[in-house]
Every structure is written in C-alpha cells, then in structure tokens.
C-alpha cells in the first residue's frame, strides 16, 4: 500500500519541520510506502526554503509552491492532484491535526472505508466560536443538499477512488466539506481531543470564517433563491391585505392624514429586504461568472523536481497534475 499525506501550508515556517518529524514517527510502524506532499500556498516567510530542505534530505517529501496565495481550497486540490497513494490523508501543518492518529485512520481504511473522518470535540474553543460553529452546522444541514458532520474538517483519509471522485468535480467555487459529503462512499468518523496550535497564528479571521460559511450555504443548494420567492409572495399578500384594510377604513371612517410613520417604516423595511434578495441573486450570478471564465484553480511556480511552466487556461485535472 502507498500512503500520501497532503499538507497545505501558508506561512508555516515554524511548523513544517515538526510536522514532518511527527508524521515520520507516527508512520514508522506502518508497512506502507509513505509520501508527504506539501503545498506552499504563496507563503511570504521561510516556508518554501524549509520545504526545499526537507525534500533534499528526505526523498519521500514532495512539494508544490503556488505562484501566489490562492487559498486553502486550491492548495488542497493541488496536493490531491499530486498525491499518488492508494490512501490520501489531508491534514494541516500546524499540528492541530495530530499525526499520531494516522495508524488508526489506516486501520479503518483497511477495513473497507473510503472516507475516514477525524472530528475534533471542540474542547478548549472559545464559547462564542463553539456556539457559532454549532449554529452553522445546524443551519447548513437544514438548507443544503448534503449533510455535514459537526466537527468534521479537512482532516480525513480518502481512498484512491474517493480522491478520483473529488478530482472529477470541476467547479471553481469549491467547498470541500460539501464535496466530500456529496461523493458519498463508505464513511466512518471518530472523535479526537482538540490540540493547541504548534507555532504561528491562525489564518482564519472572523471575516474569513463568515465568508467560508456563506460559501457553504450557497455552494450546494438554491434554497436562498426559493426563500427570496417566498419572501416576495409573502410581502405581496401582506401588501394586498394592507391595501384592502386602508380602502375599507377610508369608506368606514373617512380619509385622515395619519400614516406617515407607517409609510416610512414600510419603505425602509421593504427596501432592506429587496437589497438582501438582490445580494443573494448577485452571489449566484457572481459564481456563474467565475465558473464561465474556466480559469485554473491555481498556478504552480516550483516543485521539488523542477521549476514548472504555468498550466494552460483550462481547468486542472488529474491528467494535467504536476510531476
């Protein structure tokens, strides 16, 4: 068996050496050929230099350096395209995904599971972050067409056929958690204790987390558009009822001047609702705009083997992956 470990990195100079050592120690008793595929997502620190050193000292280390920061989704895709293993594990470089869980994941893979998901238990997280995360999963599972497991992140093992299935999905706006759920296959999950970050700082700000949650809501369903229709119909019915009430009131009690406050509140409220609905429609149109451009998900400038030329303007695929 061949095992690939894919590690996206962005400014992880302080962690990549320790992660490599931890992965090597965790897999020392595994009777499998190991490769570790690092993807430098346009880091501006010494991450690339550290990866060059690792690749020089250890022939099982491969790396791809992207031409700029394309985001974690693109970095994971680049790693999956380069991974050659029968099983592929995706994990972060900051050691919050414990490498000592790798043997357990491989054991479950050998039992016939195509996806082995390690779910953190959130102990040690801030109260409001935990509350927001649970609210997100509860809301997204009611709206989207796939079911997401609370606490399930990118730390997971995928079989070769699961990796090939993910690579066959060409969309530009990628939400990997949803893609993993969408492909299906035999899946098992287990919980592990959350561990502190080893060096560096988290790249996930509140704004990035909000945008990521929005991507999750919009990537796998059109229900926000349906809600916009329902909201419009509801407001139309309320407007007709209010109009009927005004007409009847005018016949019964005559016409008077009061109503300024009602008009102002109605105009402001309806205007806000219209702006929200236009924003939702605009999000979907914007996604169509990016999809029709058919730009590659990333550009690579260097690997451990050579400096590479930019790929063609078509979407990268498993056939066009880097050497």
Image (cartoon, helix red, strand yellow):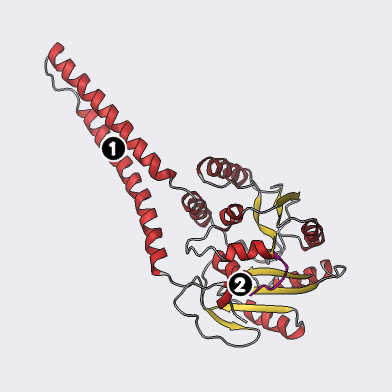
Q: Which image quadrant is residue 224 in?
A: top left
The disc label shown at residue 270, or none: 1
Could you tell me which residue is drawn at 68 percent across and 79 percent down? 62
Residue 220 shows in this picture: yes
Q: From the viewer's perspective, is 172 left or right of 203? A: left
Residue 44 shows in this picture: no
Q: Give x and y (percent) for residue 32.
A: 82, 71
Label 1, secondary structure: give it: helix
- Residue sitting nearer the eye, 278 or 35: 35
Give the magenta range.
Answer: 81-90
The outermost residue toward the top is: 252
Neighbor class of circle 2 (other Cα within 10 Å; few <14, some 14-19, many 20+) is many
**Which residue is denoted by mark 2 in the rendering?**
81
Q: Which image quadrant is residue 277 in?
A: top left
Along the polypeptide, which appears first: circle 1 or circle 2?
Answer: 2
- Residue sitting nearer the eye, 132 or 59: 59
Does residue 84 show up magenta in the picture? yes
Q: Say which quadrant the C terminus sits in.
A: bottom right
Tell me the mark number nearer the camera, choosing from 1 and 2.
2
Image vertical order of residue 4 relative to residue 271, above or below: below
Q: Give x and y (percent) for residue 279.
A: 35, 50
Could you tell me which residue is drawn at 69 percent across and 47 percent down? 122
Q: From the viewer's perspective, is 89 left or right of 44? A: right
Does residue 219 show up magenta in the picture? no
Q: Say which quadrant the N terminus sits in.
A: bottom right
- Residue sitting nearer the eye, 29 or 43: 29
- Residue sitting nearer the eye, 13 or 107: 107
The disc label shown at residue 117, or none: none
Q: Give x and y (percent) for residue 27.
A: 82, 68
Q: Give x and y (percent) for residue 133.
A: 59, 46
């Amino acid at each position: 068996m061949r095992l690939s470990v894919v590690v996206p990195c962005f400014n992880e100079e302080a962690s990549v050496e320790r992660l490599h050592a931890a992965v090597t120690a965790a897999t020392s008793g595994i009777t499998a050929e190991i490769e570790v595929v690092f993807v430098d997502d346009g880091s501006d620190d010494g991450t690339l230099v550290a990866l060059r050193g690792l690749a020089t000292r250890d022939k099982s280390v491969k790396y791809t350096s992207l031409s700029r920061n394309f985001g974690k989704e693109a970095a994971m895709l680049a790693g999956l395209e380069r991974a050659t293993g029968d099983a592929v594990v995706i994990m972060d470089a900051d050691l919050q995904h414990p490498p000592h869980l790798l043997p357990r994941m491989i054991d479950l893979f050998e039992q016939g599971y195509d996806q082995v998901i390690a779910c953190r238990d959130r102990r040690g997280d801030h109260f409001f972050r935990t509350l927001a995360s649970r609210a997100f999963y509860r809301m997204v599972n009611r709206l989207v067409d796939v079911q997401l497991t609370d606490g399930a992140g990118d730390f997971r093992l995928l079989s070769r056929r699961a990796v090939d299935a993910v690579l066959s999905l060409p969309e530009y706006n990628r939400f990997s958690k949803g893609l993993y759920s969408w492909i299906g296959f035999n899946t098992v999950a287990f919980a592990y204790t959350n561990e502190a970050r080893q060096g560096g700082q988290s790249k996930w700000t509140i704004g990035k987390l909000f945008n990521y949650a929005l991507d999750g809501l919009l990537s796998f369903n059109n229900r926000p558009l349906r809600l916009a229709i329902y909201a419009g119909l509801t407001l139309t019915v309320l407007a007709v009822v209010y109009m009927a009430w005004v007409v009847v009131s005018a016949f019964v009690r005559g016409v008077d001047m009061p109503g300024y406050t009602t008009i102002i509140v109605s105009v402001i409220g309806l205007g806000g609702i219209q702006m929200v609905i236009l924003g939702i429609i605009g999000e979907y149109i914007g996604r169509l705009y990016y999809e029709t451009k058919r730009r590659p998900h990333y550009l690579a400038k260097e690997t451990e083997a050579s400096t590479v030329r930019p790929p063609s303007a078509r979407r990268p695929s498993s056939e066009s992956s880097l050497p």
